[in-house]
Amino acid sequence: MTRSEKHTAVEELKVKFEKFPFFYLTDPSTLSVEKINILRRVCFEKGIEIQVVKNTLAIKALEGAPEDKNYASIYDSLKGPTAIMFSEIANAPAKVLEEFRKKNDMPELKAAYIDTDVYVGDEQIKALASLKSKEDLIGDVILLLQSPIKTVISSLNSGQNTLSGLLKALENRAE
């Protein structure tokens, strides 16, 4: 790889790290080409970009970012063969890995970067997969907000029936 190709690769990675708020580092070294292609296809269907990278180029791309991003804590995980899964949904790569590993032993999760937090180790997959996405959280908040309104409307409707029943009973007594 020439110097200009390396520079281009670093710039492309910088753009991806800026574009995607979440990324996972995996070790795909034991996967066959066929299995990697299957994983790439599944990732594509779920809106996840997967890219095999050179660790030194990934570190150079991360070094240019502001310190508040906390990328430095992920450098130790950039050793050996690395594939990065970029996503806009925090738990999507973990769900893909969890599903893919039902039929395969790999790829192993090295680390995951989620909103300045770093989760290191393969044992983190279940916790990461159970994270709620932004859409799930918004749905939960909407349900919580709707619950009191539904109760009030229900009470008003049942009160209306009770009130009309009382009026009919009083009308029948008057006759």
Image: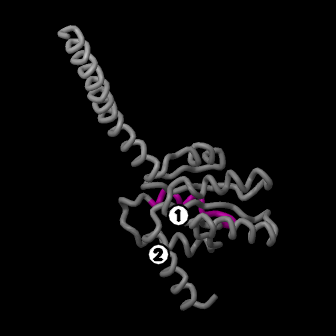
**Residue 81 in the figure: left or right of residue 167:** right
Tell me what residue is drawn at x 60 percent, y 91 percent. 2
Q: Position of residue 65 (x, y in %)?
A: 40, 69
Give the position of the N terminus as an image quadrant: bottom right
Kind of residue indicated by mark 1: Ser
Q: Earlier in the sequence, mark 2 or mark 1?
A: 2
Which residue is at the far left? 174
Q: Tell whether position 75 is magenta.
A: yes
Q: In this view, does 105 lie above or below 35?
A: above
Q: Front-most of 112 and 65?
A: 112
SS at mark 1 in the image: strand
Q: In this view, does 158 lie above or below 89?
A: above
Q: Front-most of 135 and 66?
A: 135
Residue 109, by quadrant, is: bottom right
- Span highlighted in magenta in the image: 71-82
Q: Is residue 26 above or below residue 146?
A: below
Q: Mark 2 points at which residue?
A: 14
Tell me what residue is drawn at x 25 percent, y 13 percent. 169
**Residue 76 in the figure: left or right of residue 137:** right
Q: Position of residue 3 (x, y in %)?
A: 56, 89
Q: Name the residue under label 1.
A: 87
SS at mark 2 in the image: helix
Q: In this view, does 15 lie above or below 119?
A: below
**Mark 2 or mark 1: which is in front?**
1
